[in-house]
Amino acid sequence: MRRLLVAFCLLAATLWSAPSFAQSRAQLGPLCTSEGTPADQQIDACNKIIALKVFKGGQLATVYFWRAVGWNKKGDYDKVISDTTEAIRLAPDQALYNLRGSAYFDKGENDIAIADFNDALKLGPPSGIILHNRANAYKAKHDYAKALADYNEAIRLYPGEAYIYDNRGSTKLKLGDLDGALADVNEAIRLNPKLPAPLITRTVIWRAKGNFDRAIADGSEAIRLAKSNVPLAVLTAPGSVLIAGYIHRGLAYEAKGDVEHAKDDYRSTLQGVASDAGSKSNQATAKVRFSLLSDMAPAPRDAPADPAQPQKADNTPQGQTTSPPAAPGTASRGKRMALVIGNGAYNHVKALPNPSNDARAVAKSLRDIGFAVTEGIDLDRAKMQKMTRDFLRDAAQAQLAVVYYAGHGVQIDGRNYLIPVDVELKSGTSMTASMIDMDTIMAGLDDHVRTNILIFDACRNNPMAPQVASAGANRAIEGASGLAAPTSLGSGATLGAGTLIAFATAPGQVALDGEGANSPFSAALSRHIGTPGLEVQQMLTRVRAEVVSGTKNKQVPWSNSSLLGEVYLAEK
């Protein structure tokens, strides 16, 4: 995603007026203050100017600004922020706030970025460039109404800029307006046919429309342009265009069923150096998709041979039943799929009586409303990992994917893990090696063209306390029990557009397993999830109210949504 640079108001020419600097100004000055100077040369020239200790105030701020531009070219956003902060202290300016805001945006810190863009707009006349950059941050926060308003005003103030049309088009795409998105992106391509970014956006649009050949063609042209050294804006994150081109062409290949070309593109995505939050998110998705496609060999399931036959309840440990999703290449778009797992019969940590009942109840409710359900009860790590990977692979062909898990969950270093029944932690061993990383599930499902509903009744308690005591200081577990809120994109977790994640209780809090046959949360969920015509967020509101009432305010379910419209699990 490309941002636009606002020129610093102090002219670079005024920097070289000091007589004592006459000997070096012909070389160092232009090298430091040119957008076209390679990053290392620019930084070195600016360093030498600063070391002379000749300039003060606004002139010194100019040097810091241009050194920050050099750091930005290298993707070192912490140093961009440091230099622009020092320059702002010396001489506040629109360009400085814009550059610092763009660095915060690339780090995924969108609220701080928006604050800097706001300060930039206060310091000068209305700027289409800054409005465009603020719109990008609003879009990253899924605040699409504000993003569109800023893009519209940016186009009015700065007509003819292809990137603004492209980014407005990508916002319409996230809102499901495929035709409006296509019109904007086509205009961006007309304005500047040499830019790869609009072609990448159009790759996603064609895939959403089911036209995989056109998606692949646009992705290929975008990659060709990105490799041809077409000059990019100073604020374009290094490597981000190629990473985006490869991941989206790879997803198109996978949707078409061309596994080998998809794997090649995912491999290329991972070979890029990701410096910004968006590229790190793309690489997290590519890592999971590549792993899934590299492990395509089918394995027998403990499911009835004929999925149309009634399924028997499985009361044995390690049991699983499935209504199998179609294999890659055969499932049709529009398919509704669900993965349901309940783990309670733990061997080495506290057993839970209800997750198996919870999973069976939720699975039945989902089957009753037309979902193809893959169900697992009391799974060890090998079976849990296989079932999860099979589902993530098949979900590439789905329009709506639901994941439900009941059992133990834990947060370690701010990341969430689901606990198989055979987990056994010993001193000197890695705590996470025997767990299922929730971020991996989220990254595997992250996609612009699918709706994902993830529901975790996995906060029963912290089962790891005794093991932590014996494991010493190998790894730190959060002091609070329960699960953590979804982490930032920079750490590899994703909560992309079209995703809703729900926890049985608030992050960091403990959910109740319940005194009856089901947990309070799952009992309420199984009652309401099949209600015809009930939008999913309204459904969760009813579940929340029932749980709060039934637990006398001891447990408050929590959810976070980036859904782009109304989603109905049960038909109206």
Image (cartoon, rainbow, N blue to C red):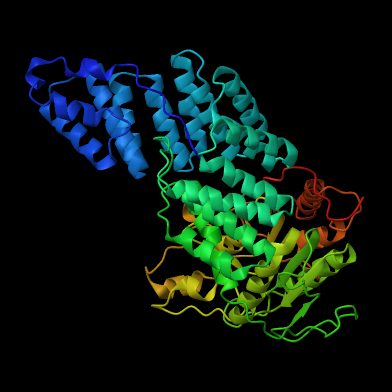
Residue 9, position in %: x, y? 34, 16
Residue 246, position in %: x, y? 53, 56
516 on left or right of 7: right
Residue 257, position in %: x, y? 67, 67
307 on left or right of 129: right
* Residue 457 seen in render: no
Using the image as rendered, state which of residue 188 and residue 15 is in the foreground.
188
* Residue 524 seen in render: yes
Residue drawn at x 69%, y 66% as measured from the top left? 405
Using the image as rendered, state which of residue 153 and residue 281 is in the foreground.
153
* Figure quadrant of residue 361: bottom right
Q: Is residue 194 above or below residue 53?
A: below
Residue extending farthest to the top is 125
463 on left or right of 51: right
Residue drawn at x 61%, y 69% as measured from the top left? 259
Residue drawn at x 30%, y 18% as measured from the top left? 91
Residue 211, position in %: x, y? 72, 53
Using the image as rendered, state which of residue 18 and residue 53 is in the foreground.
18
Q: Is residue 296 above or below residue 27?
A: below
Residue drawn at x 58%, y 63% as measured from the top left? 438
Count of numbered marks: 0
